[in-house]
Amino acid sequence: MKIKIFAFIALSLSALSIAPIANYKRIHESTKPLPVDWLGWKSELYNMDFTLPYLGNVYYHLGISISPKQVVIGRDGWMYLGDDFAKNITSKRLGATKSIEPLVKKIDISADAWNKWYSQNGVTVYKVLIGPDKETIYPEFMPDWAASSPTGVTDAIVDNGHQGIFVFPKSELVEAKAKTELPLYYKTDTHWNALGAWIAFNELTASLHGSAPDLSFPEAPRFDDYTATPRIGGDLANFQRIRVNLKDTELSLTDKTIRQMEISQFEFSSMKLISTGENIPVGAPVTPTLVRSEGALNNKRVLWLRDSFGSAMSPFMSATFSEILQAHHKRVKPASVAELVKKFKPDYVIVTNVERDSHDGYLTSLPPAGQ
């Protein structure tokens, strides 16, 4: 640890000594007006932005983050989200203390209220899939100082009741990790990959089958049905300013049957066609987006309140359901959800919510009164 600290100080001092020379050249080659006073010159000469990709790369290999509130560097180059996002590290270090009891009760009341409201408005099944954070599944690569408590907040929420609503595939992902050398999450990104998403989707389908036994689902792939290819670094590598310098692993199904299904995306409010093409991952929607799929196994409508953890899962959803109205759970208020239900008339409502964001927002909300 001392070696890393000394290296950090030495590199920082070196960068500070080089910065004025490099920036002086940049200033005079720029078309922007020259600084007019000493403070302006000082700000420009000691601007360290140009050094960040170089420092980020060196610090990464030393296990040091240049932006520790955004990204934490773990063992073997694994990266994790920092405390700038839902107090991600701190909340897991503290774990399920007595102070979370009001939160657990609030989420319990919300789940019961929404389930009742959906049932009264024609929805036959309501499910909430909580996507485990990467450190929940891969804690062994976390630095010691950031180790999570053995009693997790999300475990307490799910164990409190409503097992018929909540799906938290933590144990299934950990079990799968022990059976294969393939990664379930990206090393340099916050998200699960296609394999991790499938395992989570498989648990969702098991829960759906219990509520709607007539549904059909895609055949579960085996580990050796996935092909690994290299890709550039992910969102966490971007915080370290070294995304293009890092390599990660992309997994894709060797069997292209699901991918070759045709899907069409429409802006729901206007029903304007956005795109038509292969059944590839659909990014987190900015506005409510209707996805129709040719040849889906079930002629059912689903309102899917999701976030970016739904992207890798979206091809499996489209292979299963003919019409899916996708909306980001952070971009819709309870009144908006009610409006979407009444306009779209879904058979099912499914929520996909990443673990770190499952302790507030929609999962703590209540349906609009009088609707």
Image (tube, helix red, strand yellow):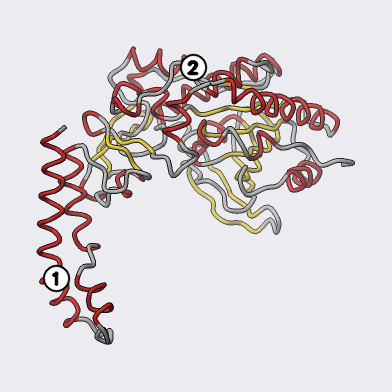
Return the mark for residue 342: none
Image quadrant assignment for residue 212: top right
- Side of 220 where 335 appears, left or right: right
Q: Which residue is mark 1?
A: 20
Q: Residue at x 39, y 27 (%)?
A: 135
Q: Residue at x 64, y 37 (%)?
A: 304
Q: Residue at x 30, y 34 (%)?
A: 187
> What is the C-alpha distance between the residues marked 1 and 2?
50 Å
Q: Amino acid at mark 2?
A: Thr
Element class at badge 2 = loop
Vertical arrangement, residue 282 with respect to residue 133, above or below: below
Q: Which residue is mark 2?
A: 151
Vertical arrangement, residue 223 with respect to residue 271, above or below: above
Q: Amino acid at mark 1?
A: Pro
- Side of 239 where 276 appears, left or right: right
- 303 or 165, which lies in front? 165
x, y percent for residue 79: 30, 36
Vertical arrangement, residue 322 with respect to residue 176, above or below: below
